[in-house]
Image: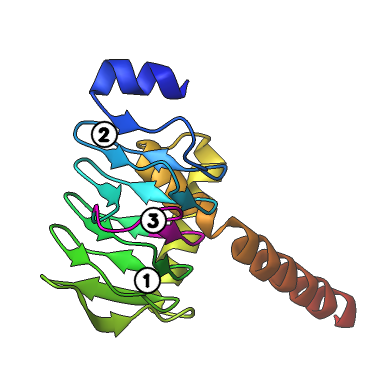
Amino acid sequence: MLWYLVIKDSADIHPAADLGGGNIIYCGAGVVIGETATTGYDVSIMQGVTLGGTGKESGNRHPKIGNSVILQDGATVLRNIIIGDGSIVTAKSIVTKPVPSLAIVTGIPAKVTGYRDENTESEKAQINSLESILRIGKEHDDLAKHVHYSFLKKWLTEKETLMLDDLTIDSSL
């Protein structure tokens, strides 16, 4: 499947790159992933993303991307650095320093502009949206599917809690 993406969408992904499961390469055009680059699980990679080295290092010289990271269009991550779990690298940003978990980085050079909150209203909206998708059984596109299923475990836990609360209320009547 990876070779199909490389041929079809002109992506340049080194065969030795270690890509985790559940990753989405939304549009492979212009994607470059170096030899020693690694990604965690559920990483979203948009078109034009580069995970590369500077050419001045040897050995382990490419970035390490955590779980559930979003790399938006044209983002460039250089050097052997770690991008923390759940981070967002915004479009056209150039990252050359480590990024903490749940950080939102933007700019050239990229700087932390904020942090994702684990319990925001938008996440609750995602959970409600997931519930409606599960009812009708279809997703709008691969990116929507990825975003929704990233919250599946939390959704199931919250749903289970609500169901137990309903049972408790019903049994007390």
Q: Amino acid at mark 3?
A: Arg
Give percent across and percent down for residue 127: 50, 62
User: Mark 2 sits on what residue?
Assistant: 27
Q: Which residue: 48% across, 44% down?
A: 133
Magenta stretch: residue 59 in it?
yes
Magenta stretch, residue numbers: 55-69
Q: Which residue: 48% across, 50% down?
A: 38
Dot 2 or dot 3, earlier in sequence: 2
Q: Do tag 1 and tag 3 residues touch (Cβ < 8 Å)?
A: no
Along the line of sight, the residue nearer the viewer: 111 or 163: 111
Give percent across and percent down for residue 74: 16, 50
- Mark nearest the camera among 1 and 3 is 3
User: Mark 1 sits on what residue?
Assistant: 122
Along the line of sight, the residue nearer the viewer: 14 or 9: 14
C-alpha gap between disc 2 and disc 3 = 25 Å
Q: Amino acid at mark 2?
A: Cys
Along the line of sight, the residue nearer the viewer: 116 or 75: 75
- Asked which quadrant contains residue 28, the reply is top left
Which quadrant of the figure contains the C terminus? bottom right
Give percent across and percent down for residue 86: 45, 67
Q: Which residue: 42% across, 81% down?
A: 117
